[in-house]
Amino acid sequence: MKRKKILFVCTGNTCRSPMAEAILRDKIKKNKIKWWDVASCGIQAEEGGTISPNSKTVLKEIGVSVEKFASKQLTQKRISASVLVVCMTANQKQLLEDCGNIICIRDICGYDVPDPYGGDLDAYRCAREAIVRACDLIIKNFIKQYKD
């Protein structure tokens, strides 16, 4: 069976989308879900950048580790290779709506994920919790319901 990919998108691919990638990957593994992979990239990402230290810290608080992360620029090829592309905000979705199967966290949960960039650990925790809830719903309402 061919692997299916979910792609998370944010602005710089250093805070929100890497957290979403790590959280969903962890949940997929813990739920023993096969054939799904997760990636992330940014609309204005610098290729090869690192995950923000605060993102790494708040992920560690919930037992999710991030090894070998490098930021990636969003491309049409990455969008086309993904079954689902999930933006952190409705504005990001609007920018990309002509590119393929694009949704945003607001479509899933009713809210945007606030950008914690430059904020304190509480700002990152707030974003993390919004992402955790969204990932639970992605597993329940998309991955487990998905039919080829």
Image: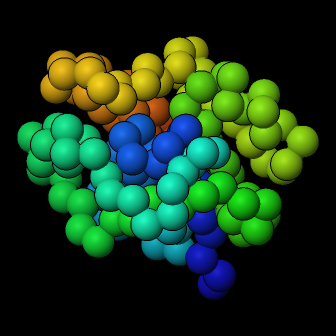
Horizontal relation, residue 113 to residue 19: left or right: right
Using the rendered image of the protein, determine whether residue 136 is visible from the camera's viewpoint.
no
- Outermost residue to the bottom: 1
| Most foreground residue, 33 or 112 | 112
Horizontal relation, residue 101 to residue 83: left or right: right
Q: Quadrant of the C terminus?
A: bottom right
Relative image position of residue 130 (x, y in whole percent): 38, 25
Relative image position of residue 21 (x, y in whole percent): 42, 53
Using the rendered image of the protein, determine whether residue 123 is visible from the camera's viewpoint.
yes
- The residue depicted at 83 percent of the width and 37 percent of the height is 97
| Most foreground residue, 136 or 144 | 136
The image quarter in which residue 4 lies: bottom right
Horizontal relation, residue 18 to residue 89: left or right: left
Horizontal relation, residue 18 to residue 129: left or right: right
Q: Quadrant of the N terminus?
A: bottom right
The image quarter in which residue 7 lies: bottom right
- Outermost residue to the right: 98
Coloration mode: rainbow
- Outermost residue to the top: 110
| Most foreground residue, 139 or 119 | 119
Query: Does residue 60 lie above or below 95 as drawn?
Result: below
- The residue depicted at 72 percent of the width and 32 percent of the height is 93
Relative image position of residue 61 (x, y in whole percent): 9, 40
Relative image position of residue 16 (x, y in whole percent): 41, 38
- The residue depicted at 51 percent of the width and 56 percent of the height is 46
- The residue depicted at 26 percent of the width and 21 percent of the height is 119
